[in-house]
Image (tube, rainbow, N blue to C red):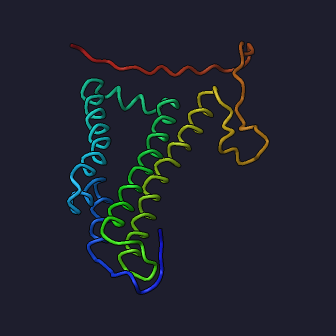
Amino acid sequence: MIASGRAHRVDPRAGAAAFLSFLVPGGGQAYNGRWALATVLLAPIALILVVAAMVVATAGPAALANLLDPRVLVALIILDVALLGWRLVAIVQAHEDRAPLVAASWPTWLTAVLVMLTIGMHLVPAWYAAKAIDTLNTVTLEGNGALFDSHGDGNVGIIAPSVQPNADERVTVLLIGVDFTT
């Protein structure tokens, strides 16, 4: 993959192709004139966007509420990791189509920076989704918050609800609702 030496010529268009595939998978392949490969790399991204638009259009605000389901968040993390791999393949392939990855050339360094940016762009949302899963599991009493347990003892300090209050205890009830007329 990465070669060193002065035998390889530096093609600045390799960095441009990698940048276009960084923006949109398949963009660099289209720039390189590889239209079939560009279509193959762009198709899953277009499909995901179409499905997401259909979900939002049909479910409306309920689609956003489903993002608070830990199973949906796990699925989104898996999709995020798959898209990360897909984008990395597109970026590196677009560069390699123009010129080999030579450690001493600036287009290779540009491609390396684009790869690092892509990894960061996918790891940050995955980390936040993992934190959301941990928070949701802790708050809903269904989980024990073990994913990010800072104490390491498995105890996240959730008090079990009492079944019956004592006669001398004060009981507070919070009623929440929406009032509207149609």
The answer to whether 114 is drawn above or below residue 106 in the figure is: above
In the image, residue 7 lies at what x, y percent? 40, 84
- At horizontal 27% and vertical 62% (from top left) the residue drawn is 20
Q: Is residue 122 left or right of residue 57?
A: right
Q: Quadrant of residue 147?
A: top right
Q: What's the residue at 28%, 30% (across, down)?
A: 56
User: Which residue sits furthest right?
Assistant: 153
The residue nearer to you, when weighing 159 against 150, is 150
- Report the front residue among 112 and 41: 41
Viewport quadrant of the C terminus: top left
Which residue of the protein is positioned furthest toward the bottom in this rendering? 6
- Compared to residue 131, the image places residue 2 above or below, namely below
Q: Is residue 54 left or right of residue 70?
A: left
- Counting from the top left corner in percent of width and height, residue 94 is at 32, 62
**Left or right: 120 with respect to 44?**
right
Against 100, residue 57 (above or below) is above
Residue 40 vs 172, above or below: the answer is below
Task: Point out the residue furthest to the front here.
Answer: 7
Of 50 and 27, the residue lying toward us:
27
